[in-house]
Image (cartoon, rainbow, N blue to C red):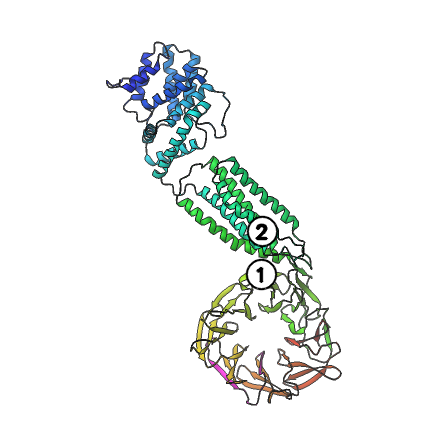
Amino acid sequence: MVVGCGWQTGAVVKLRVRWNELVPGSAHLADDLVARYVDRNRRAYRDQYLDIVLTALDSLIQLSTDPTSVRLAAWFHRAVHEPGATPADDAEASARLAEDVLPQYGVPPVRIAEVVRLVRLTGELAAPPPDAYAPPRRDANGDVLLDAVNAILAADPTRYAVHTAEVRRDAGDRKPALERRYDEVRQLLDGHLYRTQLARQRLGPVARINLETELTELDSELPAPWRGWQQAALTATATFSAIAAAVVAIAASGASWQVPTANDEVGWPPAALAAVAFFSAPVLFRCARSTSQRGRLIAGAVVAIAVTGLLVAWAQVPNPNPAVGVGLRVPLLISALLLLLLAGIAALVGSLLRTKVARFLPARNIGQQLAWLAVPAVVALVLLLIIQPLARNYVLSSNERVEGEPGPPGKFAVSSLDGTVAWVSKSVLGSGAEEAVGTKYGIAIPRQSGVVEMLDAATGELRWRYTRSDSDEKPDIVATGDGEYVLAEFSDIGYLLLDADTGHRKAAWPGSTRDHVIQQAEPLLTGEQVSRGSDKLRGVDPNGHERWMFEPGRCTDIGAVATSDTVMAFLGHSCGNDADEMVGLDLKSGKKLWNKAAADTYRRPVVVAGLVVVAEPGGDSDVPLALTAIEPRTGETKWRWPVPRTWACRTLLNAAGKYLVVVDCPGAAGVENRRTVVTAIDATTGQTAWQTTAPVSARTKVTVTADARVVSLSRGSDACWANVVSRNGFRQVRLPLGISCSRDVRAIGNQILASGTDTVIALR
């Protein structure tokens, strides 16, 4: 190689002196090697680089077994360098140069082989594995050479900055070079930089400072908006999961472990878990960001505590039976332990990830910031949308039982009221006929202790029984979904939808609907009374899904009825000067169809033959002025039926097919009035179809069958009598012994039920 006339500068002379007759008679070889490192076309690994390597080698050479071979390898390891070449390419080309040149100077083949081997080692730069703090000294020559080659990492910061700039410039395209260099530097920082203990002590601290400074500069030059988001997400998960565990544990402390609550129930475990989880949050935050063995041990201890707690809690879960149920504390405490387990695992993984993959991260970037924002939002959503529903569903499922294997349902009979009994149910302790609800598959009866029973309409036999261990009160029930379902409201639980055929729960209404009131069961409307603000009306599906909500404004109470496609709402304004209103709403969408003012709020709305019939107020009197039929889709009045001024009682309105059945008394209200007038109005025309006056007290409670018979009970001197008022007049029927006259009768279709002593009796 020809060297320019200006090559013998001070640095070159210094290098030349370092050769120091490594090989006798090799001055020309030394000149050639020096010329290669100072060649003006070389952009990296120049003479300053070689000088640093040789200087470091002088301090480490005593650790080698063949100093001459190591020194020759140091001279040759970058003797060949092409712009953009990888260390492996340079090492291979340089090794071949040594194989070609050294034999000419009488170097023994064994030494040449060692030099070539060592040069090739520099192609795999140049740090030991991260878990090899003190690797076995099986290659002393290789360790010394590689540590000397890596001495550039511990150079003066200015010299190191020049070297790294030369390396990146030499690599070619800027962005790929930056990305490649970033990965190389991070890989170096993730392990031990030197193989020999001497190099670690002398060079390691400075080298790490240089590398971290370079990595910071690379991070500012290389766009990396998402780098480190995994680490940030794990740290945030560890922190906020522990906080969530504390919140859930606090909630669990206010719930019972079993229902009914045992006198000896221990209350401290949820409080202790809340304290552990709360104080674990900052500790796990530090563990997830730590690379120390102690951090991993602490995170592992939290995992062990959570697993142990889960095993103990699961072993202590009460076994539900008709007398004992599972309390809400069970799922909440288990959920808190699972969250604490997640926090511990996230901290442990974060510590391991930081140690093995991403020890050095930029201080902050968009990925990490978004991770810290997203994780608490996700944890909050998990609490609201997963843990809370799962806890509620667990309690609902654990505490319910369905008994019975129902066959085909029997048909509802027509009670002709001939004085005999069709069937008597088995004991329905605490319930009677007045609470019976007719469905498509039979007669539903609510009972004390959280029980709903379905009786066969033809025989009175039990078809199924739904029981809850966590309720000791009688549920309120209605039939909905065209008789397909029983909607039962249990105290402290809310609305549950039961399949009327099998008794199995089909849905549980959301907890937010617990205070809603059933305005109408078929079709289903619910209302919500608000102490301040506006009452609300909702169109709801049987499963509790809300289709729409109507909120008319402040100081407004709402009453409503619905036909097959329309809702009529009656609004009473209690503040301001606004007049009361009637509003028509689409049943499916809740869209307002019409509204009009009313002089006073209409009362007692009844749906009959697709129309809504209301009692038109009669001033200060409780007796309505008239009955008005309104077309619900348009709000138009179809007909108006004046109420006789002589009537003075309740003016009960009932729908029976196409007839509106009106029950009142034909004279002044009072104890002495012992007559009742029953009027059937044809709802399609507004004309009176028939009217019958009967010698029955107007104070007697009545029921109306589907064929427009009005039935009540009265006590005689020796028996209980059924009073029947119909188109055909009035008749009384003596009932068998065992029927309670003090309880009301109930008409389901054309079948009439009465009550016995803790039984329901179907009249023939």
| Residue drawn 57% across the image and 67% down it | 481
| Residue drawn 59% across the image and 54% down it | 253
Picture coordinates of residue 591, whole percent (x, y): 45, 69
Task: Using a 10 Å C-alpha cutoff, classify the residue at mark 1 as few (fewer than 14 neighbours), some (14 to 19) or many (20 or more).
Answer: some
Q: Nearer the viewer, residue 224 or 564?
A: 224
| Residue drawn 75% across the image and 78% down it | 737
Classify residue 730 as left or right of residue 616: right
In the rendered image, residue 650 lying in the magenta stretch gets the answer yes
Q: Which of 23 and 636 is in front in this view?
A: 23
Which numbered dot is residue 271? 2
Q: Do the residues labelled 2 and 1 touch (CB within 8 Å)?
A: no
**How many tags in the picture?**
2
**Viewport quadrant of the N terminus:** top left
In this picture, is 363 found above or below 445? above
**Viewport quadrant of the C terminus:** bottom right
Residue on which the image places disc 1 = 507
CA–CA distance between discs 2 and 1? 33 Å
**Sequence order check: which comes first, mark 2 or mark 1?**
2
Picture coordinates of residue 84, whole percent (x, y): 34, 29
In the rendered image, residue 594 lying in the magenta stretch gets the answer no
Which of the 4 image quadrants contains residue 88? top left
- Find numbered disc 2 in the image and state the secondary structure of the residue it sits on: helix
| Residue drawn 44% across the image and 21% down it | 142
Picture coordinates of residue 603, whole percent (x, y): 52, 79
Picture coordinates of residue 441, whole percent (x, y): 64, 67
Considering every residue shown, the one lying at the far left of the view is: 5
Task: Using a 10 Å C-alpha cutoff, classify the residue at mark 2 as few (fewer than 14 neighbours), some (14 to 19) or many (20 or more).
Answer: some
Residue type at numbered disc 1: Ala
Number of the front mark, 2 or 1: 2
In this picture, is 566 found above or below 378? below
Q: Give the range drawn in magenta.
A: 633-657
Q: Nearer the viewer, residue 14 or 21?
A: 14
